[in-house]
Image (cartoon, rainbow, N blue to C red):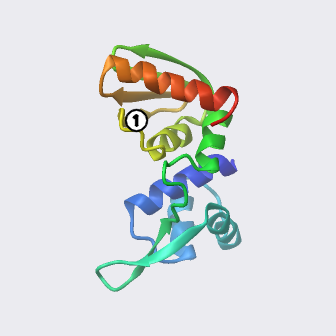
Amino acid sequence: MKVSRHAKIIELISRYDIETQEELAEYLNNAGFKVTQATVSRDIRDLKLTKVSVSSGKQKYVLHRQEEDGMSEKYVRVLRDGFVSMDMAQNILVIKTVSGMAMAVAAAVDAMKWDEVVGCIAGDDTIMCAVRTVEDTAAVMEKIRKIVSKGV
């Protein structure tokens, strides 16, 4: 699925210094996504990835940040497409997703860069988000409700 592949690409380029399309394709294939160089090329264009120089003199792919608040349309769409329900347990927010979408939705929540969210751990269809306080958890739930119900 394209949405989960895009989430994986974002995860990979933030974790590794990936310089070429072929290198990115290899990482994706090793992660279980059967892709060709042409698919990777389209994904790079869709995600608006750019290259920046790193200290070693090489270049690497990075996500071109246009939205200063982290609410890019791609992340909003991933959240809407994968979201099923959510519940809180004190300062832990548990988000249920469509099967296989938890990692993509967790990456989207992390990309929102909400100060309240410390980080997310994802399984297949469940995400546990560590949130700073109980009050912050309620605030994050409201933000998510607004996104999945009608829009940003």
Residue visible at 33% across and 86% down in the picture: 57
Identify the image quadrant of residue 98.
top right
The x, y position of residue 29, in whole percent, is 56, 60
Q: Nearer the viewer, residue 118 or 105?
A: 118
The x, y position of residue 119, in whole percent, is 36, 37
Q: Check the picture and name the quadrant holding the C terminus.
A: top right
Question: Is residue 19 found left or right of 49 in the rendered image?
Answer: left
Name the amino acid type tagged 1. Answer: Cys
Q: Nearer the viewer, residue 17 or 109?
A: 109
Question: Is residue 79 found left or right of 23 in the rendered image?
Answer: right
- The residue carrying mark 1 is 120
The x, y position of residue 88, in whole percent, is 43, 15
Q: Is residue 97 visible?
A: no
Identify the image quadrant of residue 100.
top right
Question: Is residue 28 found left or right of 16 in the rendered image?
Answer: right
Mark 1, secondary structure of its residue: strand
Q: Is residue 34 visible?
A: yes
Question: Is residue 110 found left or right of 32 in the rendered image?
Answer: left
